[in-house]
Amino acid sequence: MTDSRLQASPAVDFRCGYITIVGRPNVGKSTLMNELIGTKVSIMSRKAQTTRHRITGIQTVADTQFVYVDTPGFQTRHLNVLNKTLNRTVTTTLIAADVILYIIEAGTFGLADQQVMNLLPSNAPCILVINKFDRVKDKTVMLPFVQRIAALRDFAAVVPVSAKLRFQLDNLKSEVRKHLPANPPMFGEDDITDRSEKFLAAEIVREKVFRSVGNELPYTSTVLIEKFEVEGNLRRVFAAILVGRDTHKSIVIGQKGARLKGISSQARLDMERLFGGPVYLKIWIKVKFGWAANEAGLRAYGYE
């Protein structure tokens, strides 16, 4: 990853644009983006609302720069301050999209999917992406399902995929490229995201917390990087896991500190793979009573 904004010499038919990935929670948006760019920049877990930010993943090939934007799952229930903020992120990102990837799960289309579809603007080409296609045992039932959903809107294309197995992802990228505008690259050819390493470090720790703790910890818990130092190829990362209660602190620490040790070890390995060098990681847990109680507090912790 690099912060370079130096542009490569564009090809004659060079195309570049923003591709917004949208759908209800847990349809595989983050997995899809990571697999499309070939690098993990958006965190994943089974816990709903894992993605809270507008995450950009960049892939540059000979004649195209794909700028994918992973969005939080659109929330239709429990519209508290956090969920309203997440929803505003989704709608704002859709407005700026050159191409939209609207993701649903193979064989499933409910009210939440319809509500997301209702948000899709009419001034940008929208590709219907049917994810988790590998999970459907009887493929014959998929044809009427695809026809029913495709008839609900004028989609630019319909592409069944399995993000996890990388099934049909090259075909999906080919469809995306057809609808990207003719533009020079916006980012350096080696860039994979426009987010800072400090931001990515916080996201990695948060993913490991949710993967380790699961439903025992409220989704409002988050991670704050208190210090991020770079010395040559070494990164020193000092992170605080913010929780709302003392009982939550005990849950994250685990018996004799085993759970926190596992979180730290897994997060450090992911950071070293992403940053391409050694990482010293120190994690604390802090109880912040009512820290997510208002919108100003949310913005202070990076929910934008």
Image (cartoon, rainbow, N blue to C red):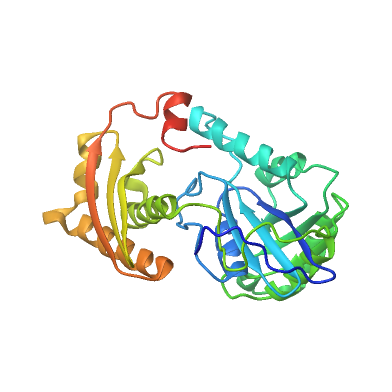
Lateral position of residue 128 relative to residue 42, left or right: right
Residue at 17%, 59% in the rendered image: 258
Lateral position of residue 280 relative to residue 115, left or right: left
Residue 208 image-quadrant placement: bottom left
Residue 188 image-quadrant placement: bottom right
Q: Tell me if residue 9 comes above or below residue 223 in the rendering.
A: below
Q: Which of 254 and 112 is in front in this view?
A: 254
Q: Could you tell me residue 86's position as x and y percent?
A: 56, 37
Q: Tell me if residue 228 comes above or below residue 76 in the rendering.
A: below
Residue at 24%, 51% in the rendered image: 283
Lateral position of residue 77 relative to residue 244, left or right: right
Q: Tell me if residue 293 comes above or below residue 302 in the rendering.
A: above
Q: Could you tell me residue 143's position as x and y percent?
A: 80, 68
Q: Nearer the viewer, residue 159 or 279?
A: 279
Q: Could you tell me residue 165's position as x and y percent?
A: 58, 75
Could one spot residue 61 in this view of the protein? yes
